[in-house]
Image (spheres, coloured by chain):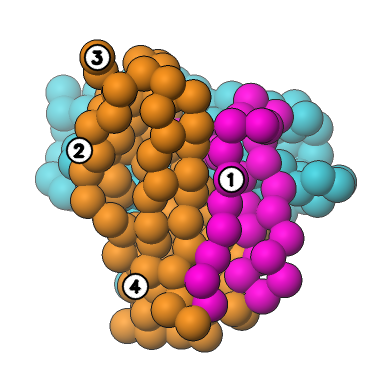
Amino acid sequence: EIVLTQSPATLSLSPGERATLSCRASQSVSSYLAWYQQKPGQAPRLLIYDASNRATGIPARFSGSGSGTDFTLTISSLEPEDFAVYYCQQRSNWPPAVFTFGPGTKVDIK
Amino acid sequence: QVQLVQSGAEVKKPGASVKVSCKASGYTFTSYDINWVRQATGQGLEWMGWMNPNSGNTGYAQKFQGRVTITRNTSISTAYMELSSLRSEDTAVYYCARVQRYELDPWGQGTLVTVSS
């Protein structure tokens, strides 16, 4: 089973700063890696799929990169509404299909 | 618009079962798999299982094998997740989500299930 690890666990930044979040897979997932944002009391929202494609309606300040085992989510300039928890996710196709989430990175206000 | 609307909060006693519904609208229900994911308070996202609404085929996380059952009623575009033998550790918000290819979008609003004696 593929394990996803995320770092750091918490990122304390100020509005306007750049955020760089990491997700590492225990084995290659090619580019089949998605990122989600979750705010308190809300369901997760898809931000990025296929490692680097923004989902519909996601602002351009969010970008994703990477392939294989190492992936990065970058928020170029933090807006107040970006302080949230971010999760990465993949699916392994080897029967049976298994979906895996990383433990999350919390971006909070410094 | 594409939307998943879940049933309301539940309070159950240990040992009981709970069945949460997820009604889809804005797309063809049988064209996309549905996943169920849960989240305990202050914790991360935990995948529980998937279902193909067209075939009814399912797959479950090993942790929940034997305790979870995902079903559907295609006539009303609704998926269900039933979890049995509830214990306090099952207290969580339960989400359904549509599977695009492997990414999940959109998600339901979540259903809080509280297990307490």
Mark 1 vs mark 2, foreground winner is 1
Which color is chain A depicted in?
cyan
- Residue under label 3, please give it: B117
Q: Classify 10 Å Cα crowding around label 4: few (below 14), some (14-19), many (20 and above).
A: some
Q: Say whether residue A70 is left or right of residue B47.
A: right
- State the extent of the magenta-drawn residues as a range: B45-74
Residue B96, image x, y percentages: 43, 54
Residue A40, image x, y percentages: 20, 38
Mark 1 vs mark 4, foreground winner is 1
The number of discs equals 4
Q: Nearer the viewer, residue B69 or B32?
A: B69
- Residue under label 4, please give it: B3
Instruction: Provide the secondary structure element on which disc 4 rests.
Output: strand
Question: Quadrant of the rendered structure where residue B61 is?
Answer: top right
Between the residue at mark 3 and the residue at mark 4, the CA separation in whole angstroms equals 34 Å
| Tag 2 subunit | A
Q: Are marks 4 and 2 on the same chain?
A: no
| Residue B69, numbered circle | 1
Q: Nearer the viewer, residue A101 or A50?
A: A101
Q: Is residue B80 visible?
A: yes
Residue B15, image x, y percentages: 42, 21
Chain seen in orange: B
Mark 3 vs mark 1, foreground winner is 3
Label 3 or label 4, whichever comes before in sequence order:
4
Q: Nearer the viewer, residue A41 or B35?
A: B35
